[in-house]
Every structure is written in structure tokens, then in C-alpha cells.
Image (cartoon, helix red, strand yellow):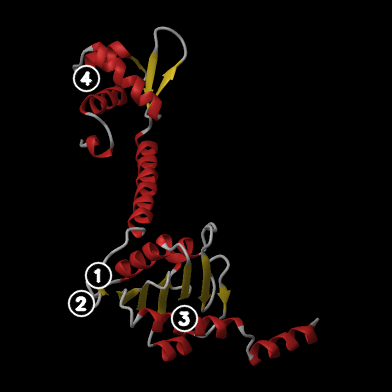
Amino acid sequence: MDLARFGFTSTEAKVYLALLRLSPATGYAVAREAGLARANTYGALETLATRGVVARLPGRPARFVAEDPEALVSRLGRQSQRDLEQLARQLATVERRRDGTQAPAVALLADRRAVLERCAFCAESAREEILAVVGPWAPELFPALGGPARPHLVVKVLSLGSPAPTGAIVRPVPVPEIESYWGGLPIALVADRRVAVCAVASAGAATGVSSEHPALVPFVRHLLRRELALGATPHPSDAHSDREARRGT
């Protein structure tokens, strides 16, 4: 088992696995099971206890219990996710210099996973502005688009139906009308006026593009601002529905 990939030294990995087999157990029993010197075993146990991987039980002689494997894996997964999000934020602040001889490439997003991962990355890395048009066909993006507020970040999202990201403008539109207008179910996002992602979903699949091209990003942003403005404007059908509702009360 390669626990070293998750921050365990060789000694700590042996101690944890030995304790997992024996829990609860004394340091002496763990050292014998792991084939390690007692001094090294006790040192590893103390380090693992500090990290929450093992727990020390009260009483004498001291006995230890290994963290449940499912709980350990879950905790490591959350920590890895936080570390990756922090790395993404740090990398997003790196200024990329271009020599002006070649326009930034347009990256093809071949499937739904690639589309959603790129959109989520751009949204979570944004520091100034997020503009997006989505719908209930992309619920995986809702946490990134409707998560906790970040200082100085403006988020404007139009959802063409429910459920929708928290704080989004919701405009229910029949799916056939959406598909006729967009050529499918849209997933579109612009982050920090720097990067645009445009995609079309259909029957659980999706395909799209991502670009930082200075001629494309402002154009997509303009279209999204237009859609957001239209989405926030009451339509005649809405007024008619409101009148009907008042008549019924």
C-alpha cells in the first residue's frame, strides 16, 4: 500500500497498518507487529496522533487506536481537494507573458467531464467577475457558481430552469425552445474577462471549447451580458401569469 503518496513516511505507514490490524494496542505490540524499533514506533505514533490518524486511549500502559480506513480516506480526499483548490488559485495569479507572435489556442473540450471540469476550474479561480448561462442539465457546476461569496468577486448567473445555482436569475424556458435557439443545452461562462468556455449539452453528453483569445473572450462576454439582461427583464408572459395568479387569489 503506497501511503507515502499521502504524506506518510515509510515508518508511519508500517505503524498505521500494524495498528490497524491490532487496535487497540500498545506501542510495544505495534513495534513487534511492524518489525520496528520501539523508539521509532513511539515517535511515529506521536506524529500520527498529532495528525489525527491514530488516537491515544487514556490509562496505562498507553494504548493506541487506528483511525477507521473509510474516515481516513475521506479526510485525505477533502484535504487533497483543498490543496488542489489552493494550487489552482495560486496558479491563476501567475502572469503569463506572451510574445505577441501567436494568438492563444482554442482548446477543444471533448466530453461532458472536460467541459464541467474546465468551467468549475475557471469559476473557482476567478477573482473579479463570473458571468454564466447554465441550466438544470449542469448541476455539477452549481457549487462553483453559487458558493460562498468571495471579496470583490461579482457573480452573475442565468439559469434557464430549476434547480439553479444559489443567487442565479432563473428563467424557465421550454427545452425545445432552448435547443432551437442554442442548438442544444448551453453551458457558457466567462471568468475575469480572461477566459471563456462555451459548450452544448445533449442527452447527458457535452462538447465545447475553452479560449483566452483576446478577440473571442470579449465577444462571448458581450453575449452573456445580453442574456443576463434579458433574463432579468420581465417578459410579457410573466406579467400575464402574474395577472392570472392575482385573479385566482
Pointer 1 residue? 98
Question: Can you say which quadrant of the picture contains the C terminus?
Answer: bottom right
Q: Are marks 2 and 1 in contact (CB under 8 Å)?
A: yes
Q: Which mark is residue 34?
A: 4
List x then y, in percent, for residue 141: 43, 65
Q: Which mark is residue 102?
A: 2
Mark closer to the chain start, 4 or 1:
4
- The residues bearing labels 2 and 4 have C-alpha atoms spaced at a distance of 58 Å
Q: Residue at x 33, y 70 (%)?
A: 115
Q: Is residue 185 visible?
A: no
User: What kind of element bears circle 1?
Assistant: loop
Q: Which mark is residue 224?
A: 3
- The residues bearing labels 4 and 1 have C-alpha atoms spaced at a distance of 54 Å
Q: Amino acid at mark 4?
A: Ala
236 lies left or right of 143: right
151 lies left or right of 67: right
Q: Nearer the viewer, mark 2 or mark 4?
A: 2
